[in-house]
Amino acid sequence: MIRLVLADDHRMILEGLEQLFNREADFEVVGTATNGEEAVAAVRRHRPDILVLDVNMPHRDGMWVLRALKPLALPTQVVLLTAALDEDEVVEAIRAGVRGLVLKEAAAVSLVECARRVAAGERVMDHAMIARALDHVLKREAGARELSEILSPRETDIVKMVATGMRNKEIATSLAIGEGTVKSHLHAIYEKLGVHGRVELARYAYERGLAASPSTER
């Protein structure tokens, strides 16, 4: 018998999941949760074989649950249920030991089969999603190496801050330097990278995987 804890913040979805698995002779739902803290508590209490975990939940989301469970070294394997994950979240999920990843748009039978295969020791993931995540990581690492060869560590930090939309004053405060020093660094960065202004710099960082999306001037 495969023992399950189900975690989803939508009651109707949670009840649907419970009914789905209860129809299967080889599954037993031993606990449910509607937020991240409840999910961790349920896993610690029941020590199930599988945790089916929704990513987007209140009071600590699914990624927080993964981080909270990892140091506990429990026998529970995690199947992540999500509408969408960005590349960094996919990488974090893999590093946290997630064994299965199912998109919510997939048929219910896919989730059941995924849980069954994970319980049997397999890793079940969307290959296209994994490929995109790995490409993103490789691109970011290559971008970081490129910057390290051109810019100083301080200049690299400033590029990343500009890419997140931080203004000169905010950067100066964060780095405990003067705003004039930030401007001097930026002029040097523009010259070294061959870009003109903050927008082009943010786009440069984005294209190399160093920022989530291009920033615009505020």
Image: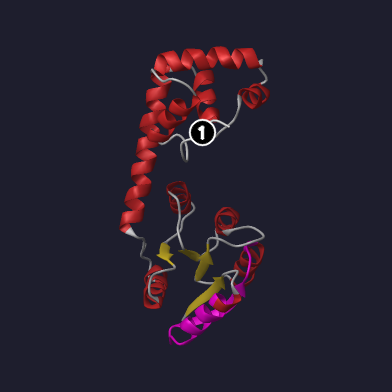
**What is the magenta range?**
13-36
User: In this image, 193 relative to 13: left or right?
Assistant: left
Residue toward you, 96 or 128: 128
Residue displayed at 43% across by 26% down: 200
Q: Residues within 10 Å of mark 1 (few under 14, many from 20)?
A: some
Give the number of callouts. 1
As drawn, 198 above or below 58: above
Say if the magenta span includes residue 183.
no
| Location of residue 57 by image quarter | bottom right
Residue toward you, 186 or 36: 186
| Image coords of residue 207 (percent x, y) | 38, 34
Viewport quadrant of the C terminus: top right
Q: Residue furthest front?
A: 218
Residue picked out by circle 1:
216
As drawn, 181 above or below 170: above
Residue displayed at 62% across by 71% down: 33
| Image coords of residue 60 (percent x, y) | 64, 57
Amino acid type, callout 1: Thr
| Image coords of residue 115 (percent x, y) | 42, 72
